[in-house]
């Protein structure tokens, strides 16, 4: 599957690698703040690295996870960062890592931004967006 903004991502990846080698001695930071200090790394990317590389319980929230969580009232937040903080405070630690992996495909395939497939959604009876339609 092609990635969006590939020119920007490629440029940031090169800058990030240079920063890792020159500023970090080739060592990937194991804290969110250290990761986010790298060029092109935001909270979502940092949380994915913390989760999958270092085994730290985090939930990576991007646009799809943010939308689903708000529609289902799983976590409130006007921004992805607010939603992530809300999920981290509400979910048991052992479920944090699975949150992103389980919710993301639902947001991409069923609970889409413009034309959600509410008739196919197994969670439609819990959905606040559906009741507002």
Image (cartoon, grey):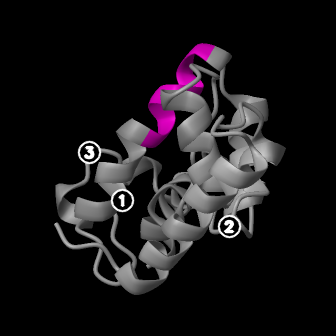
Q: Which residue is mark 3?
A: 122
Q: Which residue is mark 2?
A: 39
18 is higher (above) or lower (below) than 59: below
Q: Secondary structure at mark 1?
A: helix
How packed mark 3 is, by other alpha carbons closer than 10 Å (few <14, some 14-19, many 20 or more), is few
78 is higher (above) or lower (below) than 125: below
Q: Main secondary structure of the magenta part?
A: helix
How packed mark 2 is, by other alpha carbons closer than 10 Å (few <14, some 14-19, many 20 or more), is some
- Residue 12 percent coordinates (x, y): 55, 72
Q: Is residue 104 left or right of residue 132?
A: left
Q: Is residue 26 left or right of residue 48?
A: right
Q: What quarter of the picture does the C terminus occupy?
A: bottom left
Circles 1 and 3 in contact, beta carbons < 8 Å:
no
Is 99 magenta? The answer is yes
Nearest to the eye among marks 2 and 3: give it.
2
Q: Is residue 110 visible?
A: no
Q: Which residue is mark 1?
A: 107
Is 20 magenta? The answer is no
Q: What quarter of the picture does the N terminus occupy?
A: bottom left
- Report which quarter residue 102 is drawn in: top left
Circles 2 and 1 in contact, beta carbons < 8 Å:
no
| Span colored in magenta | 94-100
Q: CA distance from mark 2 to mark 3?
A: 39 Å
Whichever of callouts 2 and 1 sits on the residue coming sooner in the sequence is 2
Q: Secondary structure at mark 3?
A: loop
Which residue is found at the position 29% from the left and 51% from the top?
105
Q: Is residue 127 visible?
A: yes
Q: Is residue 7 left or right of residue 27?
A: left
Whichever of callouts 2 and 3 sits on the residue coming sooner in the sequence is 2
């Amino acid at each position: 599957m092609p990635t969006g903004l590939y020119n920007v991502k490629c440029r940031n990846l090169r800058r990030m690698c240079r920063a890792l080698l020159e500023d970090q001695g080739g060592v990937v930071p194991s804290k969110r703040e250290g990761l986010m200090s790298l060029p092109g790394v935001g909270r979502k990317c940092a949380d994915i690295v913390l989760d999958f590389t270092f085994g730290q319980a985090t939930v990576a929230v991007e646009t799809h996870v943010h939308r689903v969580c708000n529609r289902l009232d799983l976590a409130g937040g006007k921004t992805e960062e607010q939603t992530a903080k809300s999920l981290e405070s509400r979910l048991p630690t052992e479920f944090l890592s699975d949150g992103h992996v389980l919710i993301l495909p639902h947001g991409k395939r069923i609970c889409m931004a413009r034309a959600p497939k509410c008739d196919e959604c197994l969670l439609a009876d819990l959905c606040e967006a559906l009741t507002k339609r």
